Image (cartoon, helix red, strand yellow):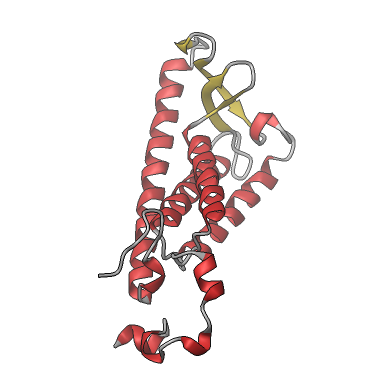
């Protein structure tokens, strides 16, 4: 019996079909993020549209509705269309990397990032004042720092997960980077390589 360290991933040995199955989990997580984000924005517009503020943890966390044409901290409010393009590029890039994912941890991280990017893109494209110039609905106030939404939380959580996974040396395809670097290809049994032929056998 082969022992496995608690923090290690075995997904690097998954055949391509197994990795692609994880890709569908990335999409499923992204869909959940989009649904929760858009549902919470619908609630915010319905309940906070009159300008009222709902304290959650005093003044530290509160619900207050604002429409943000820019990025985080309302940066670049005059370049909304640029953020729409960046959100689209980000979603495509995450999906491209996610297709190759072989790690559960990276699957969750990519799902959070993809969901956040897609729902932000939807706001930019389809919300007022027009296509490609839509304002993002923000309603979670963090003291006097900034006001965000559920998508922001998902993107932040996904980014933190990627930093942690990278620090731990866990690769996108699974396993640890140190293991791959110390493995001599000449010592590898041809029958156990992660080639398409061996994966299909």
Compared with 102, 34 (above or below) is: above
Image spot of residue 166 (x, y percent): 55, 55
Image spot of residue 177 (x, y percent): 53, 66
Compared with 77, 198 (above or below) is: below
Q: Give 41 or 28, whichever is nearer the viewer.
A: 28
Residue occupying the point 34% across, 62% down = 4
Q: Give 133 or 75, whichever is nearer the viewer.
A: 75
Residue occupying the point 62% across, 30% down = 68
Image spot of residue 13 (x, y percent): 38, 73
Q: In this view, does 200 lie to the left or right of 79?
A: left
Q: Give 80 or 156, whichever is nearer the viewer.
A: 156
In the rendered image, which quarter is residue 25 located in? bottom left
Residue occupying the point 37% across, 49% down = 29
Residue occupying the point 46% across, 16% down = 48
Tell me how many marks there are.
0
Q: Is residue 32 left or right of residue 166?
A: left
In the rendered image, which quarter is residue 5 located in? bottom left
């Amino acid at each position: 019996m082969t022992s496995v360290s608690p923090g290690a991933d075995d997904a690097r040995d998954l055949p391509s079909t197994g990795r692609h199955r994880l890709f569908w989990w990335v999409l499923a997580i992204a869909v959940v993020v989009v649904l929760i984000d858009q549902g919470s924005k619908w609630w915010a517009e319905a309940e906070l549209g009159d300008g009222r503020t709902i304290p959650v943890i005093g003044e530290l966390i509160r619900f207050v509705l604002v429409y943000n044409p820019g990025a985080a901290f309302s940066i670049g409010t005059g370049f909304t269309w640029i953020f729409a393009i960046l959100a689209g590029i980000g979603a495509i890039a995450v999906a491209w990397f996610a297709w190759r994912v072989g790690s559960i941890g990276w699957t969750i991280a990519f799902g959070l990032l993809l969901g956040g990017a897609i729902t932000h893109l939807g706001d930019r494209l389809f919300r007022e004042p027009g296509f490609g110039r839509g304002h993002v609905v923000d309603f979670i106030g963090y003291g006097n720092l900034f006001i965000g939404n559920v998508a922001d939380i998902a993107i932040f959580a996904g980014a933190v997960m990627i930093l942690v996974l990278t620090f731990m040396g866990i690769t996108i395809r699974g396993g640890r980077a140190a293991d791959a670097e110390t493995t001599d290809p000449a010592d590898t049994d041809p029958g156990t390589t992660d080639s398409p032929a061996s994966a299909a056998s």
